[in-house]
Amino acid sequence: MRFSLIKASLLSVALSTGAAGAATHQVTVSADLSQQGPVINKDIYGQFAEHLGRGIYEGLWVGPDSSIPNTKGFRNDVIEALKAMEVPLVRWPGGCFADEYHWRDGIGPKDERPVKVNTHWGGVEETNAVGTHEFFDLAELLGAEVYINGNLGSGTVREMAEWMEYMTSDKNSTLANQRRANGREKPWDIKYFGIGNESWGCGGHMEPDYYTDLYRQYATFLKTPPGKKPLLVGSGGHTEDTQWTDVLSKNIERDMDGISYHFYTLPNDEWETKGHATKFDEKMWFATLERTYRMDEYLKNNIAILDKNDPEGELGFYVDEWGTWYDAEEGREPGFLYQQNTLRDAVVAAVNLNLFHAYAKRVHMTNIAQMVNVLQAMILTDGPEMLKTPTYHIYDMYSVFQDATSIPLTLEAPDYAMGDKAVPAVTGSLAKGKDGRTYLALVNLDPNNSASIKLDVSGGLDKTLKGEILTAEKMTAKNTFDDKDAVTPKAFKTTADDFTLPAKSIVVVALN
């Protein structure tokens, strides 16, 4: 049974005008709290750490000899912040970087590791200081599971198979003993393993039929001890393309647990001039939200293909790269993909998380791009300083939905429209958390008008609802190193009978 968050009928509900002259959307949320939908897999809240710009180096890793307080080379302030928002999963080493990464370059004494050129991202030197052992150190510090992307594009079957053996073998093989000699006695656990990345593009510019044959070949030789085999991920399509989902799900009949998918939100269709991260008007605000809401259609179309080709529901659909992508910040290396993060990004994140919840039957894992200092980051750093972005706060507020049991929800809301395009003015999620409480998340996409929420909920509802709200006076509000708390959650309290959702806001409340 699909978790139906927002039914397709976006009603043309009239707006009422309050005393101050501002319009108010009339929104009805209907649910029976005794009903259950799919579990919202915690891995939907996965993160992504690629060797790109200052994402790994400076952002996460400063080395054990740094004056910045660290544990095993990873900066304590960043680790503490990420642990607080309960990161369940981290994807590494890419991304495009994965298909040029040769794992043997990143093991053994650091002063003996080869220095390579990161040809994808800025042409900078890659010291390989952070390799397999260091990445698993990071995961253990975070208490997170791992998603490793293997090198299909420029690697070999043997190389990928031997990496798997190095990481997972409990025998006295040469590779397992090499791991032990490098400081790790016990094998590691791997939750997911991707066979290539963006094989339609930077991972080799392949056609899906050709990739399918390669996938079957590579997957055949990924051997692990009993009970140690990770979930294997096929490199799927992107944006409106459904061909990869179709070909892979029809032609790979074994050794594939899910298909990846990528979609980045740009304010426009121009990759060369995507739009500014912080200088935008309502037209660009709307364009960004309209484009990000296309995720609904893209998920629906790909999942329809999976339902046809995989009616037993054995394959997951993994959105392992998504988020906002703007023009690089002026004065910075364009290949480092550093951009600021505003209230707009928080709304984008919440809208997409609501959609992932809606398709939780198939969407078991996603990875926002990326964790630190790259694209829609959780955290930005500047030397010894760090700050939490508005997107970080959404992940923190929404952490109650990790492994929660979804509750079917009907949300009747008017459109937020501009020209001939429209998105729902309000989207939402409803689920019973692991703590036994029922949580409702609502997002008001309209930057000008509030929403009056009518709760038509059976099954037990507190008269007073408490939670958190994230909003700001301006659409462009952001956290800076001079004002780290400009956009931060505040306590939210309302009654079930008088529930107003402010303009451009995200609220998470407990219903009981």
Image: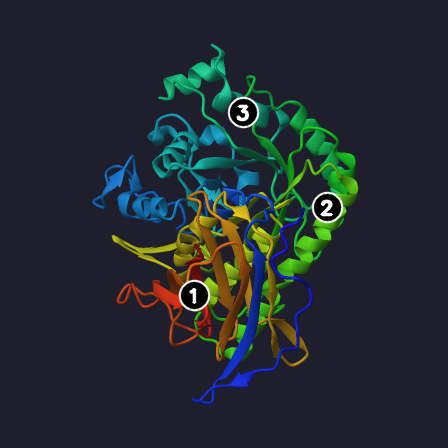
**x and y percentages locating residue 190 in the rendered image:** 50, 30
Name the image colouring.
rainbow
Label pair 1/2, CB-CB below 8 angstroms: no
CA gap, disc 1 and disc 2? 33 Å
> In the rendered image, which residue does mark 2 sit on?
244
Residue 386 in the image: above or below residue 435: below
Residue sticking out furthest to the top: 172
Residue 50 in the image: above or below residue 156: below
Q: Indicate the amino acid at tag 2.
A: Trp
Residue 509 in the image: above or below residue 244: below
Name the front one of labels 3 and 1: 3
**x and y percentages locating residue 504 in the rendered image:** 46, 72
Mark 3, Cα crowd under 10 Å, few <14 / some 14-19 / many 20+, is many
Report the residue at 71% width, 50% height from top.
302
Q: Indicate the amino acid at tag 3.
A: Met
> In the rendered image, which residue does mark 1 sit on?
329
CA gap, disc 3 and disc 1? 38 Å
Q: Earlier in the sequence, mark 1 or mark 2?
A: 2
Report the residue at 35% width, 66% height from top.
487
**x and y percentages locating residue 471 in the rendered image:** 40, 69
Mark 3, secondary structure of its residue: helix
Residue sticking out furthest to the left: 67
CA gap, disc 2 and disc 3? 25 Å
Mark 1, secondary structure of its residue: loop
Residue 72 visible in image: yes
Mark 2, secondary structure of its residue: helix
Report the residue at 72% width, 38% height from top.
211
The quarter holding residue 377 reads bottom left
The quarter in which the C terminus is drawn is bottom left
